[in-house]
Amino acid sequence: RRVREAVVSTQSTGMVKMEVDYSETVATVVPECETLAANGKLNEALEKLFLLEKQTRMAGDAISNSNVLVCVVGCCYKADDWPLLKENLTTLSKKRGHFKLAVTKMVQRACEMVPEVTDKAKKLELIEILRKVTEGKIYVENERARITKTLAEIYEKDDEMEKAAKILQELQVETFGSMEKKEKVEFILEQMRLCYQTKDYIRTSIISKKISTKYFDSKDTDELKMRYYRQMIDLNLHHKDYLAVSKNYHEIYTTPAVKENDAQWKEALQRVVIFLILSEYDNEQRDMLARVKADSNLSKIPYYQNVLTCFDTAELLNWSILKEVYSSHLKSKAGQATTPLDTEDNWEVLRKRVVEHNIRVIAKYYTRISLSHFASLLHLELKEAEDMLCKQVVKGTVTAKIDRLDGIVNFTKPRDTEEILNSWSGNLNSVMTLIGNCNHLITKERMVHQVN
């Protein structure tokens, strides 16, 4: 029986309450139409369904209307009539007064068909029509994102990486309110991966900032956290930002799943140390070094602890001895994963960091030193020692002046104007105090002589 309800039209909201409940009618007609379509009478089935669709839409029965639209799409798909399927998807989504719920259900049903289609050409046609139907519709933004991701995967399999990356970048999933946080992060990670593989490093860096690392503090995010920081390591290695790489490995090291596996946390901590000593000296690097050195697990990898201590001690390091002692331990052995110090380029970077460390030590203990003695302490040629010193002065790590005529390096820090004025004022006060004392003593001497 049809159940009449109160008809209330709210013009301010544009919402119309259901007038007639067609659920029983739909429950009867839909199976009949599915049977007709299965027997090859698709047009006859669609005629009945279109009539019922109009009735349910005009009566405001959104749920029944949704079931009808799903049935229309399902009948066309089972009958393998792709032109009719595409036509109905487009037409039904543009019907006047259509329900968002009905269109959403129809699109969801069509999206379920995509993995079932084996023919590549038909699958691409279905994806493209779904992308057109969902374009600009917020209530089906999740479905559009998922179907776009599927299309990007197809392009990637065909080695069209740039096309896959471009099409995936069209969607700003971070603005989707109805999408779950986990799915957003997975989607953004996929965008990062494709951009990196197409060597679009700037865009990769921009996209990476869309993920808040606080999300990884919640439960069941270890896998996503590992994926994110692995990709950030690749990106930072490309930019040769070794301190950032060290921090990325430290985040991996602190992951609960890694902490439970001895081999994994040791490997992660080893890489934290290696990239930390490869990074340039600054306040941030010093802070990171202090935090890593305070980790109790560092004592379980003694060679890495020792090399880190070398860079934290104000003593000169001999590069030849250091390389001879630690190269066999810091390089990978047969059957082990490769380490950053397996490449000669990184050993050259480490040599420069040793020289820079020695320059800071010399600047700490010397105010003036001959250029020849300075070069001998660094175990470098005179020109290379001078070049390395100049680079450190430019970076602001040390303060020095070179007198080339006398061959002297002066590490005295120049005083600023305010400091000079304060010193002059203090000296002037001292002079005036001495003059006052002298005047007092002279007056006292005179008074003594007058009495006598």
Image (cartoon, rainbow, N blue to C red):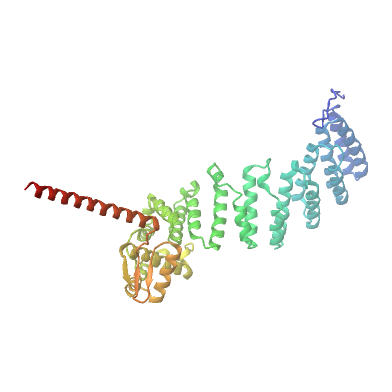
Q: Is residue 12 left or right of residue 335?
A: right
Q: Quadrant of the N terminus?
A: top right
**Closer to us: 252 or 438:** 438
Asked whether residue 381 is in view, the answer is no
Numbered circles on residues, count: 0
Q: Residue at x 24, y 51 (%)?
A: 433
Compared to residue 348, the image places residue 215 above or below, namely above
Compared to residue 301, the image places residue 73 above or below, namely above
Q: Position of residue 63 (x, y in %)?
A: 80, 33
Q: Residue at x 76, y 46 (%)?
A: 111
The furthest residue to the left: 452
Q: Position of residue 40 (x, y in %)?
A: 91, 46
Q: Is residue 344 left or right of residue 105?
A: left
**Closer to us: 245 or 408:** 408
Q: Position of residue 155 (x, y in %)?
A: 72, 59
| Quarter of the image where one finds residue 361 | bottom left
**Closer to us: 236 or 158:** 236
Compared to residue 61, the image places residue 164 above or below, namely below
Q: Position of residue 447 (x, y in %)?
A: 12, 47
Asked whether residue 188 is in view, the answer is yes
Compared to residue 320, the image places residue 10 above or below, namely above
| Quarter of the image where one finds residue 413 | bottom left
